[in-house]
């Protein structure tokens, strides 16, 4: 096929792809504990159906220990052609506060060329980008294809990491496309070359055997909630910069977003300052950040006049690509122990860690991607970082050191992933699917193969 034919084939396949994205995003495939399992398995079944429809001769669900099934597909490489592994995930974040959604989270709604709903971007857009790109070749793929679509990335991605380590030949490839990132803005062609790692834990503070009347005991009895709040606020300085010893600020050698652009994308309210120090690229992509993502405390509506005996918080740390998650989590938990007031009892649990990623300077696959993306977007791509984490990427890098790992996708920074009103821009999705199809073609050419 010629590039013109590939572009036309992707464009022709897009209406079907959009309808399939609606079907997939309508399934509440939240793979977190406490959520129904049946929708997650239904999403796996539909993903399997979609990969079969893309022309892959072998598609099956594969069991991942302790997790929901992944969906695997493959097509053999033509003689002398490389093999490309395509990754995405079909599970999604919980919807969160339903009142904050302008449209129902699991009723995908098309508004002005954008499809709104939980998972429409993260990462069911990645599934559909793969399917639409593959469908353009009508089963006659120019390179070998392997596809792995994960079922529990948002909660327990480390379980697929173990699967990769236990099944190295199943996923071995010359190039790996991870469709779980995006451009800073719609149409701003970019390749993500660095990912921060992450660590998360729950901290619990205990002070009393049981709640006490705040009138009879307040002022002398140690309040667990007050102690926990003091500990958590100690993590940051007055300007919001992380003040845990051993977690220095880093530098990103590339262009980051402009401050006004970032404020608008993030929805920062008028008069509210940004936090941290250094350039935005430094803060977002190459430095540590610590976020309190949840607390177990009495609600305002259910509050009673009592001194609290126990309080818990969930803390998430984002770690520069070269940082070590275990060392980082040890530094943060030790700091919290040191700043804990009044001799309160402190315990930590439910620890999750994942490493970051730093791409090398690029090779034949990156060159092929540059050509494909320039044609699809009308401009050559630039390198950007991502503050989010995809721990699997580092596992793939360690398992397949000779493979080039390429990260791009349809999740632009305005897509509101993990937040209410998540959406994907359908024109961006078309360009991403076109990029992927053109990349598979470019990688098969003699110039890419070095012959």
Image (cartoon, grey):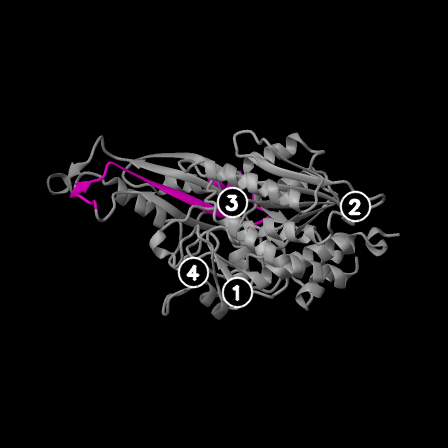
Using the image, tell me which numbered label, if any, was put on residue 275.
4
Using the image, tell me which numbered label, if any, was put on residue 82.
2
Secondary structure under the numbered disc 3 in the rendered image: strand
Camera-nearest label, 4 or 3: 3
Is residue 330 among what the camera can see? Answer: no
Tell which of 218 and 159 is nearer to you: 159
Secondary structure under the numbered disc 4 in the rendered image: loop
First of labels 1, 3 by sequence position? 1
Label 1, label 3: how far apart the Cα atoms are: 33 Å
Label 2, label 1: how far apart the Cα atoms are: 36 Å
For label 3, the residue is 198
Percent x, y for residue 440? 74, 52
Percent x, y for residue 11? 66, 61
In the image: residue 433, left or right of residue 339: right
Task: Please check the rendered image and state whether residue 309 is part of the magenta-colored stretch, yes or no.
Answer: yes
Give above or below for 195 relative to 337.
below
For label 1, the residue is 113
Camera-nearest label, 2 or 3: 2
Secondary structure under the numbered disc 1 in the rendered image: loop
Camera-nearest label, 4 or 1: 1
**Start-end of magenta stretch:** 302-331
First of labels 4, 3 by sequence position? 3
Q: Are marks 4 and 3 in contact (CB under 8 Å)?
A: no
């Amino acid at each position: 096929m010629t590039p013109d034919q590939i572009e036309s084939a992707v464009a022709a396949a897009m209406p079907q792809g959009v309808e399939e994205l609606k079907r997939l995003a309508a399934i509440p495939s939240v793979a977190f504990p406490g959520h129904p399992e049946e929708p997650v398995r239904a999403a796996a079944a539909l993903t399997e159906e979609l990969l079969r429809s893309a022309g892959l001769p072998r598609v099956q669900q594969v069991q991942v220990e302790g997790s929901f099934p992944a969906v695997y597909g493959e097509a053999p490489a033509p003689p002398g052609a490389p093999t490309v592994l395509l990754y995405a995930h079909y599970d999604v974040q919980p919807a969160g506060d339903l009142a904050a959604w302008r449209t129902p989270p699991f009723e995908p709604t098309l508004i002005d060329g954008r499809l709104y709903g939980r998972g429409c971007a993260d990462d069911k857009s990645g599934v559909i980008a793969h399917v639409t790109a593959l469908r353009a070749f009508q089963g006659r793929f120019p390179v070998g294809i392997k596809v792995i679509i994960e079922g529990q990335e948002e909660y327990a991605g480390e379980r697929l990491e173990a699967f990769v380590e236990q099944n190295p030949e199943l996923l071995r490839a010359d190039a790996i496309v991870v469709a779980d990132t995006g451009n800073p803005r719609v149409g701003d062609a970019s390749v993500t070359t660095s990912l921060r790692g992450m660590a998360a834990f729950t901290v619990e503070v205990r002070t009393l055997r049981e709640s006490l009347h705040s009138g009879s005991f307040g002022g002398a009895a140690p309040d667990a909630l007050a102690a926990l709040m003091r500990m958590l606020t100690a993590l940051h300085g007055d300007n919001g910069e992380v003040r845990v010893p051993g977690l220095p600020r880093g530098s990103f050698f590339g262009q980051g977003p402009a401050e006004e652009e970032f404020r608008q994308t993030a929805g920062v309210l008028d008069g509210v300052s940004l936090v941290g120090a250094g350039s935005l690229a430094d803060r977002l992509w190459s430095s540590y950040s610590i976020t309190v993502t949840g607390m177990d405390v009495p609600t305002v509506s259910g509050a009673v006049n009592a001194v609290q005996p126990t309080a818990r918080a969930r803390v998430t740390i984002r770690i520069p690509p070269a940082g070590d998650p275990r060392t980082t989590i040890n530094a943060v938990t030790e700091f919290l122990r040191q700043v804990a007031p009044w001799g309160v009892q402190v315990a930590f649990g439910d620890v999750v860690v994942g490493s970051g990623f730093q791409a090398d300077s690029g090779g034949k696959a990156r060159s092929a991607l540059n050509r494909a993306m320039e044609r699809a977007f009308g401009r050559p791509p630039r390198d950007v970082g991502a503050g989010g984490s995809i721990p699997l990427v580092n596992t793939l890098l360690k398992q397949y050191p000779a493979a080039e790992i390429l990260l791009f996708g349809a999740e632009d920074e305005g897509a509101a992933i993990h937040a209410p009103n998540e959406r994907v821009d359908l024109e961006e999705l078309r360009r991403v699917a076109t990029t992927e199809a053109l990349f598979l073609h470019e990688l098969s050419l003699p110039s890419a193969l070095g012959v």
